[in-house]
Image (cartoon, grey):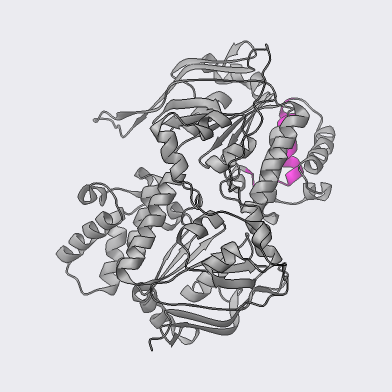
Amino acid sequence: MAAPVVELSGLSVALPAGAERPLAVEDVSFTVEAGEILCVVGESGSGKSMIAHAIMGLLPAPHVRVSGGQARLQGEDLLAMSPRRQRAVRGTGMGMIFQEPMTSLNPLMRVGDQIDETLRLHTPLSPRERVERVIELLDDVGLPNPRELRRSYPFSLSGGQRQRVMIAIALAVEPALLIADEPTTALDVTTQKQILDLIAAMQKRSGMGVIFITHDFGVVAEIADSVAVMQDGRCVEYGSAEQVLNKPRHAYTRELIRAVPHDIIYRPDFDPGAEPGILQAEGVRKVFHVGGGMFRKGRELVAADDVSLDIHRGETVGVVGESGSGKSTLGRCIVGLHRADGGQILFRDHDLARLSRRQFRPIRRHVQMVFQDPYASLNPRYRVADIIAQGPVAFGTPRAEARARAEELLELVGLDASAARRYPHQFSGGQRQRISIARALALDPDLLIADEPVSALDVSVQTQVLRLLDEIRRRLGLAMLFITHDLRVAAQVCDRIAVMKEGRIVELGTCREVFGAPKHEYTRTLLDAIPGKDWEIRPETWDDPDPDTPAR
């Protein structure tokens, strides 16, 4: 009988002294057979990625190291290998797709050369044969015009295209094991569906085993054969996808499943009354010029074209669509980070599209933005109190008063006032997003632009942040523009939905109208692409919870 593709037995990974807990991974055991997809699920910090890095031999030793147990790849002990043997096995026996392709791909190398590097190191193919294999791999992962695209640099590709290049690199020598670490977290639903279908199709064709790391149970329902649920470094539940999804035994698994925004529940219709919208955008247009040079004319990229919508005080308007549809461009035009090339953006009797940077400055305190990546948008050298107080101080508030207000805002967003004295890196992703929200509220804005504020967060943290945003909107009477690619998320917090495609709004209406009876084919495509949409959660059929259920 053939050995499993990968077998973990009592694997433990130790953290350095002073960490939150002594072990990042504690006594974890599971197997992956050929042709099987195992989904490893859990919140940030649960040890999911540590397991992947231990298998791949990518732990940052000696500070983080395997402290016990075994990891075998097709019967061979991965933990007893020499560094030279590890490098060989990483190229031929197993491959890995990382969460963020832009930081994993070399920005100075063409994508074809990056795939060729794997082939050159691990295969006997000639240069001509490697070129043809690169083109074949790019074609296999569904990239257009692969013969030309192989000469492109990573920055010129979309997020979904970069992820496909990462898949091509991982599959270049057809490994027995593929590890995919959150490969679809920040992708829009249609690109996510394409990537999931691609991984499943290539896995079935080659018979490789797959470890798919995710925090999205919708993705699990779409592709998993078996599921391992991680909590605080331990595997608290392990079984078939059918059992874990529909008959979860552990209380933590049930908590995660209940946090999944599965059903689209329509909010009561918002009544704006007779008052005009606090923001009125009419025919907004934004064009970027790309690829030009001294002797070469660039091309025009129309990011927003004739976009019109209004937002009333106390209302949340959602903007949904794929990457590149113009969602974030619209938000950045409103907040003054981009200058619109046409149309009007009326706010407080000012046309924001016509204001210079200097003229926009007094308005900026009334229009604030929460960005997608809180770690990149928070200055790592400043303490949290200084980050939140920076805006009010710039507008004349005394520093002591601004810092006191910062502590009040931290409590408003669910953090202890003591967080004011710490630095951003000392917080989790969900906590950093709460800090970003507190910073945006520090200037008492009338309009809040939330640009994908929960796309990279765990489902449980995501639910908390969404509830927080909705509570703050109600309490303070804010108007909010909520930008997202997840229609399930939009349904939870938005009163009206604008669906964008290729820079234009193709459908605009209440949640009931857009989700219940979509008029545009593109809206129907987005709804059909929601992962796990056919999975029905039925807590009433669950047995009594057993929080002490041991891992299988």
| Relative to 293, residue 78 above or below | below
| Relative to 121, residue 497 above or below | above
Question: Which image quarter: residue 125?
Answer: bottom left
Q: In what quadrant of the picture does the C terminus appear?
A: bottom right
Q: Is residue 492 visible?
A: yes
Please tell me whether residue 272 belongs to the stretch shown in magenta.
no
Horizontal relation, residue 364 to residue 191: left or right: right
Q: Position of residue 7 (x, y in %)?
A: 49, 81
Name the outermost residue toward the bottom: 1
Horizontal relation, residue 104 to residue 425: left or right: left
Q: In what quadrant of the picture does the N terminus appear?
A: bottom left
Q: Where is residue 503 in the image (x, y as percent from the top left)?
A: 41, 28
Which residue occupies the foreground of this view, 538 or 215?
538
- Residue under the image location 27 percent in, 55 percent down: 138
Q: How many marks?
A: 0
Name the outermost residue toward the front: 541
Which residue occupies the foreground of this view, 132 or 16?
132
Question: Which image quarter: residue 413?
Answer: top right
Name the outermost residue toward the left: 128
Q: Position of residue 440 (x, y in %)?
A: 68, 34
Please tell me whether residue 380 belongs to the stretch shown in magenta.
yes
| Relative to 75, residue 317 above or below | above
- Residue under the image location 36 percent in, 75 percent down: 176
Which residue occupies the foreground of this view, 132 or 364?
132
Question: Which image quarter: residue 250?
Answer: bottom right
| Relative to 250, residue 374 above or below | above
Q: Where is residue 42 in the image (x, y as percent from the top left)?
A: 61, 62
Magenta residues, dominant SS class: helix
Q: Can residue 393 be seen in this view?
A: no
Range drawn in magenta: 378-395
